[in-house]
Structure formats: C-alpha cells, structure tokens
Image (cartoon, helix red, strand yellow):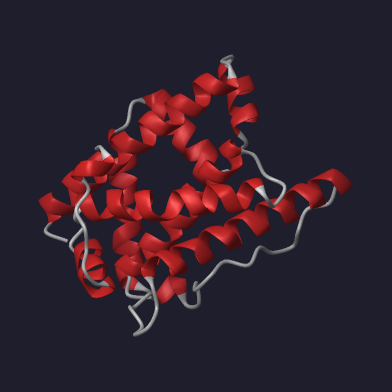
Amino acid sequence: MSVRSLPTFSTDLDLYNALRRRDEKAYHFLYAESFPSFRHWVLTHNGAAMDAEDAFQKGLLSFLLNLETGRYELQSNTRITTVVFEYCKRVWFTELKSARLRMRGTIPDAVDMPDTADVANDLERLELVDVVRQSLGQLKDECRKVVEWFYIEELSLREIAEKLGMKESSVKSKRYQCTEKLKEYYLQTTKRLGL
C-alpha cells in the first residue's frame, strides 16, 4: 500500500475504533506513522534496522492483543502512536537486557510482560489465543515453524537461519511473508467466527 493511498484518521478515537474493527487500513496507517520514528530511535540506542523491525512487530502485536482484549482503552489526550512507541520501546529494552544476560551466561528467572495480570482468567484472551492457534495451523509447516521460533520461542533470525540452512536475509524475508500470511488467516478466522 503506497503512502499516498493511506487513509487519514482525523482523531485518535477514529483510529482506535478502526483498530477495534480490525480495519486493515488502520494497521497500515499505524505502521506508517509509528515505524519510521521507532526505527530512528532504535538506531540511536544500540540497535540495527533489523532489530528495529523485530522489536516493532513484537511491540505492535502486544499492543494489538491488549487492544483486542480490552486491556488497552483509549485515554483522552493520549496519542495511539505514542502508546505503540512505548510498547515497542519496552520490547527493545527487554531485548537489550536479555542480550546482556545471555552474554553473561545467565537466564532470567522471570520476564516482565506489560499488562498480563490474571491472564488465566481472561476468557477473551483465551479466545484470541485459540484464533491465533487456528491461524497458525493454516500456515505451511516451514512458515509455522519460522513464526513459532521467532515469536514464541524468541529465537534470533540467525538461529532460525542455522536451523533451516538458509541465509539470515532469506529468513528475514520469509518471516515477513509468513507473518503477513498469518495476519490474513487471522482476519479470515475472526470474520468466520464472528469475533
């Protein structure tokens, strides 16, 4: 989708409502508005362009899951793009901390996750997880593995490349294609289930 064809949302409430409706144009808009500044920020905070992309996707996914389950609600005088930026920053700081811990050879006892109190009792979140599982199940085997290894097991692109015997750049491209396919299946599944 080109920048020229992106819709504009006159208020954050319009954007919030579009995201709640799972309007794909709202996702594209949010990406176009938030990613460039986050990428610049990561580049100035010990990261590379690939790190920025990975942290942004994880942060955005976390934000959207919280929006879906009602854990995030729009606050007056708060920009959604600022909130997304904060989610992504938390991911990047966690990545940096984790990398430093791995360098020392220790594993953290626990990882702080934003807004996850009482997840076991959150029926909506369980429904959402079920929809994601169904969507994952529709992916071809290699795609499913790439998505699970990267987002669930949190393997680096380099580690995945070694497992698959591929170049890291090829894995990055495959991860992007597989994530886009997963989004497509997710939207189809939610529509089919009327969620």
Instruction: Judge by depth and name the residue closer to the eye, 180 or 33.
Output: 33
Judge left or right: residue 99 versus residue 166: right
Estimate the x, y position of residue 56 in percent, counting from the top left: 49, 50
Residue 121 visible in the current orientation = yes
Rendering quarter of residue 69: bottom left
Instruction: Judge by depth and name the residue closer to the eye, 182 or 3.
Output: 3
Estimate the x, y position of residue 28 in percent, counting from the top left: 29, 48
Residue pictured at 62% horizontal, 54% vertical: 92
Residue pictured at 32% horizontal, 31% vertical: 139
Query: Farthest residue in the right direction?
Result: 104
Residue pictured at 88% horizontal, 48% vertical: 104
Query: Farthest residue in the front direction?
Result: 4
Residue 49 lies, with reference to residue 133, above or below; the image says above
Residue 154 visible in the current orientation = no
The quarter in which the N terminus is drawn is top left
Estimate the x, y position of residue 183 in percent, counting from the top left: 29, 43
Residue 180 lies, with reference to residue 96, above or below; the image says above
Rendering quarter of residue 193: bottom left
Residue pictured at 59% horizontal, 62% vertical: 90
Judge left or right: residue 16 versus residue 31: left
Query: Farthest residue in the bottom direction?
Result: 76
Estimate the x, y position of residue 86 in percent, counting from the top left: 53, 66
Total labels: the figure holds: 0
The quarter in which the C terminus is drawn is bottom left
Instruction: Judge by depth and name the residue closer to the eye, 165 or 56.
Output: 56
